[in-house]
Image: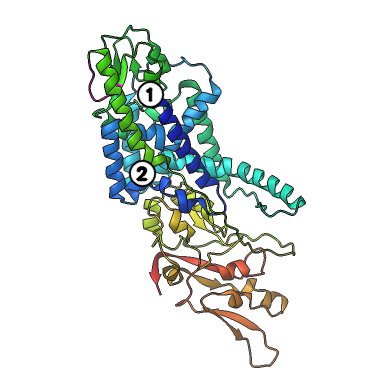
Amino acid sequence: MLRKIRRIVAIICFSLITLLFLDFTGTLHAWFGWLAKIQLVPAILAVNVGIIIFLLLFTLLFGRVYCSVICPMGVFQDIISRITNRKKYRFKYLRSLKWLRYSVLVIFCVALIAGITMVFSILEPYSAYGRIASNLFAPIYVGINNFFAFIAERVDSYAFYSVEVKIKSVVTLIVAASTFVIIGVLAWRNGRIYCNTICPVGTFLGLISRFSFFKPRFNESNCTNCGLCEKACKASCINSKERKIDYSRCVACMNCIDNCKQKSITYSLKVKTEKVASEKQTDGSRRNFLFWTAAFAATSAIKAQSTKVDGGLAILEDKKVPNRQTQLTPPGSKGIDRFSKHCISCQLCVTACPNNVLHPSSDLSSFMQPEMRFESGYCRPECTKCSEVCPTGAIKRIDTTEKSSTQIGHAVYIRRNCVVRQDGVSCGNCARHCPTGAIHMIKNGNSANALEFPVVDKEICIGCGSCEYHCPARPFSAIYVEGHEVHRII
């Protein structure tokens, strides 16, 4: 029963978290965005004290249930292990590589404190799975959606709409594919070997779960030393010969309890020598386990939402990204330094961005963290999606009023690229589309036929990128946005 409960809750959590990275409509985050915010490292970076205390107390009470239910990377390993090897009893006890586990944990903590984003974002399990989902699974998901959109169009239905399949970063795609292969091979060979050897979150929670109140325990009076518990343990932490369990690696999957023919292993607060008493204690622990995990199984109806995208009939040469001296970070991040120290590169904001502005960075200083680009859209003042979905607080929750008054950068005009100068024609696209009125067209001369050129008022420009996006000049825009290291309110 415990194993079934654990599996049901784990599948629900895993499915919903995966859908958060696949959903391009932005509807799911309003209902299930809390699943991203209850992940341990995002909660720590967001200084969400309530969630941190809850997870630590939950682990102290029931062991590493977090790893087998809430963490998507943990459940992902179980799925791969199950699919690639159907043999029921295929595991064996492995000694803990403590030197490796704690070395990785120390490296992770140092990188987190020092702001070495490349290191801690690769090791952090939630963000690692997020990159796999958004870079490998999302194109497949969008492709299936486009197939249904194609069919729906033929029967005059608008239940689906086609979405362009894009690879937003080749570097991030390579990292995600490499992570997928490594996790897949390890899970195929030894189940939870990554979770219990490399994952820093698992090692940290393992330090607490050693002292957990409820845990699988041997009742030696019933044990026949058959070894089935050891062979069924995907964490490879049960030494059946010595009847010992390494609780720092146990993820409370309940496989040992379900496979023990003699019922000599119970998930309990205390072992009873009598078999009947042990069964009663197990029933009590089941009720407790169900009570604490029921909160993670709540679901709601999903409200449909349509999206509106800009388009045109003319085939234009693709724009190239300008060489910005200072990168742009989303409104709500407050500046480059703070953003880089809090962002774990999970790509959730990249997935949620409806304007296709956020892309994973390939720069080593901000490796795989989102950066703003305006070739395919601009940061609309009325959109606050990235701040709504960010689980770490790297992008603080803001409203449209605050966003419209936050200056993340300013526009810079490059006269030599302008079509007014190159082709001698009138334009004014940048001024016409500027939402803050920061760009004015000034005549170059006193004659009636004098052409007008744009002038930027840097004091009221918020750096939304509308001018850069709407500029018709190719391959480089005649006006682009230069970022500010620290945002300011105007």
Q: Report whether residue 330 is seen.
A: yes
Asked if disc 2 and disc 1 are in contact, CB closer than 8 Å, the reply is no
Identify which amino acid the numbered label 2 is placed on: Val
Q: Which residue is drawn at 45% across and 53% down?
A: 389
- For mark 1, give the secondary structure: loop
In terms of secondary structure, where does tag 2 sit? Answer: helix
Q: Which of 54 and 185 is in front in this view?
A: 54
Q: Find residue 98 and report its horizontal and vertical position in percent.
A: 31, 25
Amino acid type of the residue that numbered disc 1 sits on in the rendered structure: Met
- Residue depicted at x 35% and y 27%: 252
Is residue 414 part of the magenta span, yes or no?
A: no
Q: Position of residue 199 (x, y in %)?
A: 39, 33
Residue labelled with disc 1: 254
Q: Can see residue 172?
A: no
Rendering colour mode: rainbow
> Closer to the camera, 344 or 192?
192
Q: Give the side of residue 291 with respect to residue 274, left or right.
A: right
Disc 2 versus disc 1: distance between alpha carbons?
Answer: 25 Å
- In the image, the segment drawn in magenta is 267-272
Which secondary structure type mostly characterizes the magenta part of the structure? loop
Residue 271 counted in the magenta span: yes
Q: Which residue is drawn at 26% across and 9% down?
A: 221
What is the quadrant of residue 443 in the picture?
A: bottom right
- Picture disc at residue 41: 2
